[in-house]
Image (cartoon, rainbow, N blue to C red):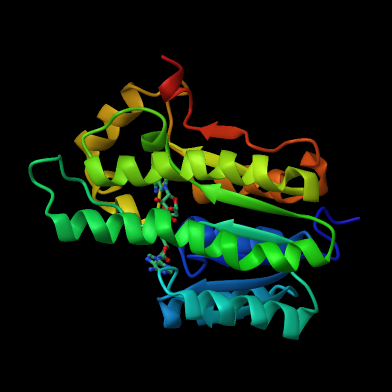
Amino acid sequence: MARLEGKVALISGGARGQGAAEAKLFALEGAKVILGDILDEEGKSTEAEIKAAGGDAKYIHLDVTSEQDWDKAVKEATSGYGKLDILVNNAGILLRKGIEETSAEEWDRIQDVNSKGVFLGTRAVIPEMRKVGGGSIVNISSVAGLIGSTSAAYGASKGAVRLLTKSTAVQYGPEKIRCNSVHPGLIDTDMVHDIFSNEERMSNRIAITPLGTFAEPKDVAFAVLFLASDESRFVTGSELVIDGGTTAK
Ligand SMILES: NC(=O)c1ccc[n+]([C@@H]2O[C@H](COP(=O)([O-])OP(=O)(O)OC[C@H]3O[C@@H](n4cnc5c(N)ncnc54)[C@H](O)[C@@H]3O)[C@@H](O)[C@H]2O)c1
């Protein structure tokens, strides 16, 4: 049996990058997938790719900072597929600036998308997961949510996601709603295209990575698949680091 057979999953930021890789893998493993994003064209083409491969997917416009958009996304899942079992809070934006270079507006924008977006998504899906007797929420944080970095607002937003994950796990464990965070290191997506397109920066990053390589979106997607599936039924409040060993040092 496929690993997500019979499950309905909502993935934010699913148009491209890691979110799209998760959507494709989830569909291959039998899930019905709703992918939400603000990049409508890319989202629709990811939906089409999944369908062409025989999967079941639907793209919807979802700005994770909008309560109304979250309500619509949850309704789309329940009216179209009858229920909601899985949420991947994957949408995120990066700001590579230190404390003195960051404006108050930039700070707010990063917290709004990366941290408040996760809160709004979590709050929106809990009632539906309660109705089906449980569920799995996977929050995409970062290694920047575990250790200090020069990206002040981004690190703070991802640290918030790490602890919101544990609060969700503690509060909703008795209702069998699990919640775990995932902490990727450098992954080859548009978000960090500038690093991957610069040979010197790439070789510096590889040099500090014990596994001596970089990761692709599917390396994160396989971990998210495990946490989303019932295989991880006793795992909640945990943090799964996918960084080639960088933060082990
Ligand atoms: N790429 C990396 O090296 C890396 C490392 C650690 C963590 N992450 C995290 O992984 C997640 C996925 O990022 P990615 O690497 O695939 O980058 P990406 O830029 O390709 O994907 C991010 C997606 O989020 C969407 N998004 C941005 N703002 C949104 C909003 N307001 N509402 C809905 N969607 C929105 C984007 O449109 C995009 O599709 C992010 O949370 C990111 O912070 C990335």
**x 47%, y 65%: residue:** 13
- Is residue 120 shown left or right of residue 115? right
Quadrant housing residue 166:
top right
Quarter holding the N terminus is bottom right
| The one of 161 and 28 positioned closer to us in this rendering | 161
Rendered position, 3 above or below 53: above
On the rendering, which quadrant does ligand 1 occupy? bottom left
Q: Nearer the viewer, residue 64 or 211?
A: 64
Callout count: 0
In this view of the protein, can residue 174 be seen by the observer?
yes
Observer-nearest of 96 and 119: 119
The residue lying toward the viewer, choosing from 192 and 138, is 138
Q: Is residue 140 above or below residue 236?
A: below
Name the residue rendered at 53%, 57% in the picture: 89
Taking the spot 32% from the left edge, 41% from the top edge, the residue there is 156
Residue lying at the far right in this picture: please name it: 1
Give coordinates of residue 148: x percent, y percent: 30, 28
Q: Residue furthest top?
A: 249
| Residue 91 in sight | no
Q: Position of residue 91 (x, y in %)?
A: 45, 60
Q: Quadrant of the C terminus?
A: top left
Task: Name the spot of residue 121 as percent of width and height, x first.
Answer: 54, 64
184 shown above or below 71: above
**Residue 239: percent from left, percent from top:** 57, 34
Task: Specify whether 161 is left or right of 121.
Answer: left
Query: At x 69% / y 77%, what residue is drawn?
Result: 77
Residue reaching furthest to the bottom? 79
